[in-house]
Image (tube, coloured by chain):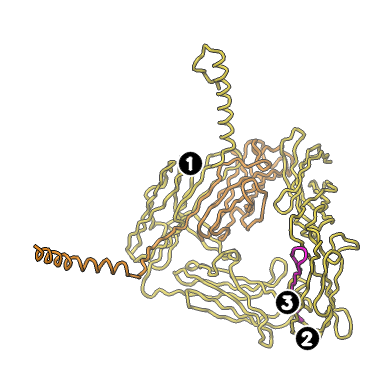
Chain colours: A orange, B yellow
Amino acid sequence: MKKKLFFLSLVLTLALAPAGAALARVDLDTDTVVVPAVVCPYAEIRGLQDPSPYPYHYPLGLTYIGYEGETHQWNTYFNVVANTDIGMQLDQVDFTHVSKGDTFYTTGDLHRTSGYGGSHGSMFGVYTNSNKLQAVNNSVQGQASEWYILAVTGRLGDVYEQAAGEYEAQFTVTVFAP
Amino acid sequence: MTFLAPHAGKDEGGIMWKKTGLIIVAGMIFILFFSGPSPAIGLRPLVFELDLVPGAVEDFEIILSPEETRTVVNLDLYQPVQLQGGELVFQKGNPKWYPATGWVELEKTRTVVVPGRKTVVSGRVRVPFDARGSHIVAVMVEPEAPQEPGVTLRFRFAVRLHIRVDRPGLRPAAEVKELAITGGEKGEPVIQALVQNTSPLDYLTTAEATVRDSQGRLVERVEMRPEMMWNYSQPEIRIYPFSELLYSGLPQKYLPPGEYRLQFFFRYAAGRQVVISETVQVKEGDFLFPEALMAAVQISPHSLEFIGRPGTVTSRGLTFENTSEQVLKIILEPVDIESGYPYSVFANTEFSIRGAGCFLIEPGRKINTIITVCFPRDAKTQGNYGLLKVKVVNPEGNLVEEQVLALAAVVTGEHRYTAEILDLTFNREEGEVFLAAVLKNTGNREFFPGARVLFQDMEGEPLNAIKLTPVGEEYVLPAKSITLRGTAGNLPPGGYQAEVEILAGEKVLKTTTMNVKLR
């Protein structure tokens, strides 16, 4: 009986020894396992459709009396969050009469700001006007969360130069990785 | 809107439910107008780097972040164009003019992003068998903006597909087409080099120029970049296939009239280089230099700030460099902001110049001087200010020049930032209304002043918000005044309410409202 037990334990020892050795090797192994991870360049625009806070938001829109040179400004905030360098392009379509096609002088300036409700901070070269309908800067922001204001200004020409009625302007902000 | 009570016959219950209903409606209105989180648009990745072979077919996926509202998103193909200043502009793609836009197929050009669900748009790139080099296509991802009266604001993302098709024999190449020194916007000298990528490959570049005088001595080494790339965080600038970039750099040293040798070093594609040289003549009056640059003695820094607790000592160094060709004598003379100035650095601290306040300096040599401020134990928590006049005298004893440095010694602690508008005037010139405000710093630290004026009609309806900025000096010292100016455009004559905010940088120090009458 003792002999049988001895042989059984010997067989088990021989059978399990390599496994044990293998386990021991795993424990002692000092190689580094490299787990590759890639974080894709990502960008997000937040804060859209928020009503801009007083005094920058005029709930009634831009209502002009109609005198020569009358100027009004409209501002809106947005927040860009990115994990990479990003650039911005601004494209402008002037204030245009919805049916007659008359236009008046329009400008668009992108400013940095401290946050939602902050005042106009520095500009970074992305500004358009009726003579320059497109502007771009390849390096506006890095890996950060930044707030911006788009300030749109419309200035009427001489009284006869633009018909009374409804006008619309359009601004397009393009975010890209340079 | 009417809310029906569940127990319509019971008056008390009905009133209670009506009240509850009103509270709910008020709450809904509040949430609609002042809701914190707002819709956001996000996507990844912004760039696909695709290294392919002729005839290859490669799929890609653009992942749109879940929205908080259901959003329709349009996708279209664009061509990025690199301008000379380094800007990328995006033009609608036309395979006729830019064949690579014809290689990209999008699974759909319109999709709906539903709240809480990731949306994936797939695409496929089919590279023709005769393709070679780098080709860049942008997938423009644009959420549909609601059409609003007045100003419509649209946002979009340009997802760049960078398709590189390798073929034997393809090599990056560049040609420097022009090297010159020209006058900038303010008449300052600008070194410019126009470089063309003459290969169908894109690659990274760096550039610098050296300026040597007629004796071959190095005057300056100038880093050069395309105009729009100065804020770019990476030192290397990518140039697109067959694009031209105009690299420019500003010499920081005075260039007296004479002959100079410009040398332009253009490094590209990790190890390649183009070097070209040009001899240029600088004539009297060709360029405008800041006065400080033209000075016989260069001083660095131009202002000194000492910060410390009561009972401590702080020192700062000043460097003087004689850029003239004669021995010069430097005389340092501390001067108060004004007689009896309550925030005087000399009256409120122990100010000393280590060594003599007068020394000789040889041509081409530099001398460092240490200036020390000792804050007394009973020093008040405030800023203290003064000036350091630097007189430069030639061997004949004649005054060559005089420079003035600003001094500030700040005792740390809680400082008081306060200000008053002493006067606000309106002038109409050629139909335009100009505002001028006199602002007095009533606090105990200097600050960068500004003001915002919001014009309202007499019913309180906002009309025009304008910003006033300083004229001349950028900051205002304690107990001193400064003039701020701004324009209110063509505000018609009449009575208005003006809400004036006094600013220190971005911080509002005070708000006052006044009635004004414009003529």
Viewer-nearest of labels 3 and 2?
2
SS for dot 2: loop
Q: Position of residue B411 (x, y in %)?
A: 77, 61
Image quadrant containing the N terminus of chain B: top right
Spatial distance from mark 1 to mark 2, Cα to Cα? 71 Å
Q: Residue at x 62, y 52 (%)?
A: A110
Residue A166 or B301: which is nearer the viewer? B301
SS for dot 3: loop
- Compare marks 3 and 2 and give the one earlier in the sequence: 3
Count all numbered tags in the image, as a single digit.
3
Q: Position of residue B11 (x, y in %)?
A: 56, 13
Residue B142 higher or lower than B160, as above or below? above
Residues shaded magenta: B306-322
The residue carrying mark 2 is: B362
Q: Are marks 3 and 2 in contact (CB under 8 Å)?
A: no
Quick check: A108 left or right of B282?
Answer: left
The quadrant holding residue A154 is top right
Q: Is residue B218 magenta?
A: no
Which chain does the numbered disc 3 sit on? B
Residue A3 higher or lower than B29, as above or below? below
Please rate how many residues cluster around mark 1, counting C-alpha atoms within 10 Å: few if below 14, some from 14 to 19, many from 20: some
